[in-house]
Image (cartoon, rainbow, N blue to C red):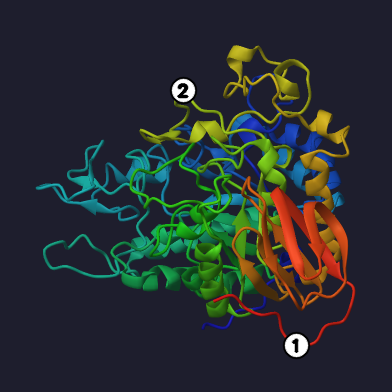
Amino acid sequence: MTSFRPAPAWLADAVFYQIYPQSFADSDGDGIGDFDGITERLDHLAWLGVNTVWLNPCFVSPFGDAGYDVADYLNVAPRYGTSEDLARLVDAAGRRGIRVLLDLVAGHTSDRHPWFRAAMDDPADDRYIWAPEGPRPDGFVPSPGTRPGSYLPNFFAFQPALNFGYGRARPDEPWRLPVDAPGPRANRAALRTVMDHWLGLGLAGFRVDMAASLVKDDPDKRETAAVWTELRHWLDAAHPDAVLLSEWGEPEVSVPAGFHADFFLQFGGPTDGRALRSLWSNGEGTVNEAWDPLDCFFDAAGRGSPRPFVDAWHGAVTALGDSGFIALPTANHDFSRLNCGPRTAGQLPVAFTFQLTWPTLPAIYYGDEIGMRYVPGLPEKEGSVLGPRYNRAGSRTPMQWDEGPNAGFSTAPADRLYLPLDPSPDRPTVAAQRADDTSLLHLVRRLIALRTSTPELGPGGSVEVVHAGYPFVYVRGGRYLVVVNPARESGSCCVEWLPGVRPLESAGVGIDAGTVSAEGFGYGVFELTDARTGSVPQVN
């Protein structure tokens, strides 16, 4: 494994909060969220206890793909404000102990980026991947300029792939450039320039979009990994306190390549994201028709198992050792919220108990802390629709702050909002849940505080699985027993070695004479009050 500078100490204690800036808070009444809106709501994040925020792309863009089609990496989109507004946000967050990460789109640009506008009329420009005139290779798009031939997009047709070279050459395709050709070298240098610019303004790092997509036809991602290894060594020297998080979904590959952490995602790796989907994906909301069918563990029917996730996590953490981290999100801008389809708000406390006590870095998607719902049936918005059952707009609706107009998100007329609000008459709000000590919001806050004050519950604490079923029972750091039962039916298991326990956070869980019983949707975190010897029996 390549030797890197150890990750900044702060990363091990990170509790991430993802903000989709269009939908978080609108300060100027135009119906679209902005930097000043986020700044005005930082006290909510500080009260909640999160300490690291990452923002979806906020660069200049025509917004064909919600900002992932970047037209200028060094300037922010006017819809969000100015670079000075972003700087004030970063400063205000820092005063509250919150770091801010930006989303870096490394593998492609918008077709309106000046680089592409030049390349489409210049046959000598190899900043993008171009095939000459003739039979068009699969997946290529006809040239929109005077340059003959076609270009390779990375996702949508209006997102031309930046040229980082090919892992394998082919004599019949001479346009496959090696990774050390001038165009790929220029693009690697450009990534350093972009990162240096924003890190110099106080940002704490980047979450990198489609991080595995750089080098094409790259078996085992060896050449793509080499690109990130080079960039990590530069980052370690130039900005040693900054971090890189990857949208890769395969920590065994991405972290050794140079990322400080990778997310378990709904895609990625040889199982196409099965680990995350085995927890949360209940066949509603965002569904890729190509996904293998499975019963997720956090489902009221109780037909799933924590094993697919635990096995994937164990394999990844064994491969990584202490070289980096795995992050576990509640949801994201591309994937269904926890409150989706048949899963209701009443089932979320047990999900958060698991997410905030498992040895991964937790990432809370904005609004999940109050149980915001995936809203079905919304119109397509800025490239949100990816398939007949995959509309990402349902996870991108405005944050629900209070009972006022537009749920406190914006003063704009309702028909000018970025996306419609959840029309449910009982939609949750921050204000209502702040006033209710029994709410999900207060539970999430208490669980974050418990995690933050208890090193054994962090990513470095050990985990021993006691019962891999309903309930799911495990011990953290030899001192804390966690019980979660995502099923509607009660369940129990025998733990004969169990010493005395003290409940720290519990609902519907009983422990008596070596038996752990959990009501439907019950959960609990307990401190083991008596010393015990030996190891916890493992479930095979």
Q: How many marks?
A: 2
Residue designated by label 1: 534
Going by the image, does 506 lie left or right of 399? right
Residue in the foreground of this view, choosing between 516 and 165? 516
Label 2 neighbour load within 10 Å: few <14, some 14-19, many 20+ = few
Residue at (35, 51) in percent of width and height: 161
Q: Amino acid at mark 1?
A: Gly
Label 1 neighbour load within 10 Å: few <14, some 14-19, many 20+ = few
Residue in the foreground of this view, choosing between 438 and 109? 438
Q: Amino acid at mark 2?
A: Pro
Q: Quadrant of residue 99?
A: bottom right
Residue in the foreground of this view, choosing between 490 and 43? 490
Residue designated by label 2: 379
Q: Quadrant of residue 55?
A: top right
Labelled disc at residue 237:
none
Q: Position of residue 175 (x, y in %)?
A: 21, 60
Q: Are marks 2 and 1 in contact (CB under 8 Å)?
A: no
Question: Which tag is nearer the camera, tag 2 or tag 1?
Answer: 1
Residue in the foreground of this view, choosing between 535 and 81? 535
Determine whether the residue tagged by mark 1 lies in a helix, strand or loop: loop
Q: Position of residue 441 (x, y in %)?
A: 79, 41
Determine whether the residue tagged by mark 2 lies in a helix, strand or loop: loop
Residue at (68, 60) in percent of width and height: 492
Q: Quadrant of residue 271?
A: bottom left
Task: Report, in whole angstroms, how far the alpha carbon at label 2 lies from the one at label 1.
Answer: 57 Å
User: In the rendered image, is residue 66 in sight?
Assistant: yes
